[in-house]
Image (cartoon, rainbow, N blue to C red):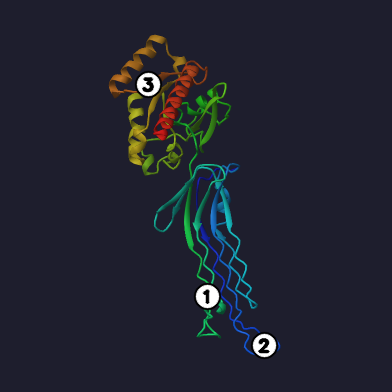
């Protein structure tokens, strides 16, 4: 199935039904009085988070969604039937914006969570509602109000604990294959990863985390070069970023700075997230050489965070990396739990 993570749709809630003007017509009753019923309410439009969906591709083929209108009122004090609400299924992790105002309407982060995006119209009143001691034969009714119409922009953001960043061919997909059951495409040419992919990394009994791999970023990506930064939104919710770099690169420090500059242009808050440096392909280096490169990188970049040297092909250092990541995520969860309990 094709991966689509952005879509534009129009939602239209149902209109309220009009009130009815009617009078009783019964034998031997000279003044029957009004008996016009109220109309029905228009249907609302909701977005529903469906854990079975992982793409917005369905919205490429259908863009208009309408809820039912409320039925008009009827004689004999019969109210019109309200329109049925419309539920539109979207993937978990979908962010919803009003296309016209760019207002954030909400996020659907939990399975079966609902978001109200368009309110149905209110019913109109029948002439029975206007009966009084001084007006026994009212001829007044009200129409139903129109339902809300909205153009929406949907963005799907993968729900992952850890995100992989790096230049093309840094070995991100190979690392994902090595430490999880995911099988993304790998190759010895740039941009083998065209769409984000997820992998579940198991670190022990009842312990695991979700890792997201996005296409490689190159210099000028913020201006549309390569695949651009269109997939960086998928690491916005992660608790940790793993910056993967090729330890064999002749311009290792410049490569790392290139990614940092593109992150800064896209969203400076991403640079505020915890970010670890993962130097890949150490199986092609001797231990002394690896230690020297790590020391030089830490000095030249003034890198304060952890640096892990691994081989995504052979698995060297990968177990130590995932164990450290799991411990970091556990600490984050414990801190959030402590803060929420205060």
Determine whether label 2 and label 3 are within 8 Å by CB.
no
Give the side of residue 103 with respect to residue 39, left or right.
left
Q: Position of residue 36 (x, y in %)?
A: 60, 78
**Disc number for residue 306:** 3
Determine if residue 166 is in view: no
Disc nearer the start of the sequence (3/1): 1
Work out how far the residue at label 3 is from the one at label 1, CA to CA, in angstroms. 66 Å
Label 2 sits on a secondary structure element that is loop
Give the side of residue 88 with respect to residue 157, left or right.
right
Label 3 sits on a secondary structure element that is loop
**Disc number for residue 29:** 2
Instruction: State whether residue 141 is above or below residue 45.
Output: below
Sort mark 1 into few (<14), some (14-19) or many (20+) by Cα contacts within 10 Å: some
Give the side of residue 197 with respect to residue 289, left or right.
right
In this view, which residue lies farthest toward the right? Answer: 27
Q: Nearer the viewer, mark 2 or mark 1?
A: 2
Foreground: 19 or 62? 19
Foreground: 77 or 255? 77
Work out how far the residue at label 2 is from the one at label 3, CA to CA, in angstroms. 91 Å
Q: Position of residue 160 (x, y in %)?
A: 49, 34
Q: Nearer the viewer, mark 3 or mark 1?
A: 1
Determine if residue 70 is in view: yes
Instruction: State whether residue 62 is above or below residue 42.
Output: above
**Disc number for residue 143:** 1
**Disc number for residue 68:** none
Q: Position of residue 186 (x, y in %)?
A: 54, 29
């Amino acid at each position: 199935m094709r991966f689509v993570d952005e879509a534009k749709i129009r939602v239209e809630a149902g209109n309220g039904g009009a009130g009815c003007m009617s009078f009783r017509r019964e034998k031997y009753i000279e003044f029957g009085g009004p008996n016009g019923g109220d109309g029905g309410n228009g249907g609302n439009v909701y977005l529903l988070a469906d854990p079975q969906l992982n793409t917005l591709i369905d919205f490429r083929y259908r863009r208009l969604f309408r809820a039912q209108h409320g039925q008009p009122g009827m004689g004999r004090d019969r109210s019109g039937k309200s329109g049925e609400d419309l539920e539109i299924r979207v993937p978990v992790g979908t962010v919803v914006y009003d296309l016209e105002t760019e207002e954030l309407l909400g996020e659907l982060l939990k399975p079966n969570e609902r978001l109200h995006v368009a309110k149905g119209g209110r019913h109109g009143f029948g002439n029975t509602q206007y009966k009084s001691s001084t007006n026994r034969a009212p001829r007044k009714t009200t129409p139903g109000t129109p339902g809300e119409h909205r153009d929406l922009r949907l963005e799907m953001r993968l729900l992952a604990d850890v995100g992989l960043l790096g230049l093309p061919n840094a070995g991100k997909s190979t690392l994902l294959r090595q430490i999880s059951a995911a099988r993304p495409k790998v190759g010895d040419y740039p941009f083998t990863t065209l769409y984000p992919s997820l992998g579940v990394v198991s670190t022990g009994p009842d312990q695991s985390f979700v890792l997201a791999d996005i296409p490689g970023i190159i210099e000028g990506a913020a201006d549309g070069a390569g695949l651009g930064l269109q997939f960086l939104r998928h690491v916005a919710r992660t608790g940790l970023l793993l910056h993967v770099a090729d330890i064999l690169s002749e311009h290792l420090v410049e490569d790392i700075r290139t990614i940092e500059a593109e992150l800064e242009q896209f969203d400076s808050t991403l640079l505020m997230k915890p970010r670890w440096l993962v130097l890949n392909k150490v199986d092609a280096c001797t231990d002394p050489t690896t230690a020297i490169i790590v020391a030089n990188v830490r000095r030249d970049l003034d890198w304060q965070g952890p640096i892990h040297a691994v081989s995504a092909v052979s698995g060297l250092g990968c177990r130590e990396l995932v164990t450290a990541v799991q411990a970091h995520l556990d600490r984050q969860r414990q801190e959030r739990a402590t803060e929420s309990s205060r």
